[in-house]
Image (tube, rainbow, N blue to C red):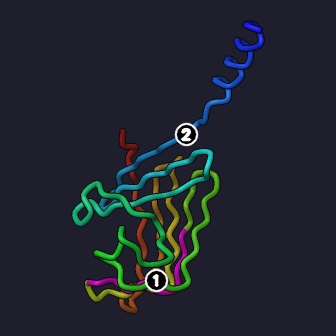
Amino acid sequence: MNRLLLILTIVLFSMNVVAEEIKMKCKNYRYKFVSNDSGTTVYSANIKRDKKKYHKFCPSGIDDSNRHFLKSAEGVELLVTNYKAICSSSKLVFLNGGVGTESVSVTDFKKFIRVSEYKWNGQPQKQKEKCKLEK
């Protein structure tokens, strides 16, 4: 009986949940990649506006975590694969009056880079920045 209990205990402890968290800091934003048994979630925080208070990256709607800067979101899709978060949106309206359209952003948590193309108030914009691993 004791032997069975010992084997069962060893098996249960060896099946522990593995969680992974990667944080990186870019010029204006911090990003956090969290992967665990319930899936993968990506968060972001504007360094000046949000400090270290993260909200979901690529929000498909307005909630308590993003209503302080986002007015509306349309056509938002997020794909997370191979430590890359790819966010596309057709239109984002911000409380500061800015409108982002035709946006595609790629955040790479292995190469620590971020690349995006979008239109800001109708003007085409491109960004490419190197980021740093944050501990």
Q: Is residue 38 above or below residue 66?
A: above
Q: Look at the numbered disc 1 and give the secondary structure of its residue.
A: strand
Marking on residue 73: 1
Residue sitting nearer the eye, 118 or 10? 10
Identify the residue shown where x is 55% and y is 75%.
Answer: 88
Residue sitting nearer the eye, 65 or 48? 65
Amino acid type of the residue that numbered disc 2 sits on in the rendered structure: Ala
Residue sitting nearer the eye, 17 or 22? 17
Range shown magenta: 87-95
Amino acid type of the residue that numbered disc 1 sits on in the rendered structure: Ala
Q: CA distance from mark 1 to mark 2?
A: 30 Å
Magenta-colored segment: predominant secondary structure: strand
Identify the residue shown where x is 49% and y is 60%.
Answer: 107
- Circle 2 is placed at which residue position? 19
Locate residue 3: give its quadrant. Answer: top right
Label 2 crowding class (10 Å Cα cut-off): few <14, some 14-19, many 20+? few
Instruction: Give x and y (percent) for residue 40.
Output: 58, 53
Label 1 crowding class (10 Å Cα cut-off): few <14, some 14-19, many 20+? some
Locate residue 13: give its quadrant. Answer: top right
**Of all residues shown, which one is farthest toward the front?**
1
Q: How many marks?
A: 2
Q: Look at the numbered disc 2 and give the secondary structure of its residue.
A: loop
Q: Is residue 97 left or right of residue 22?
A: left
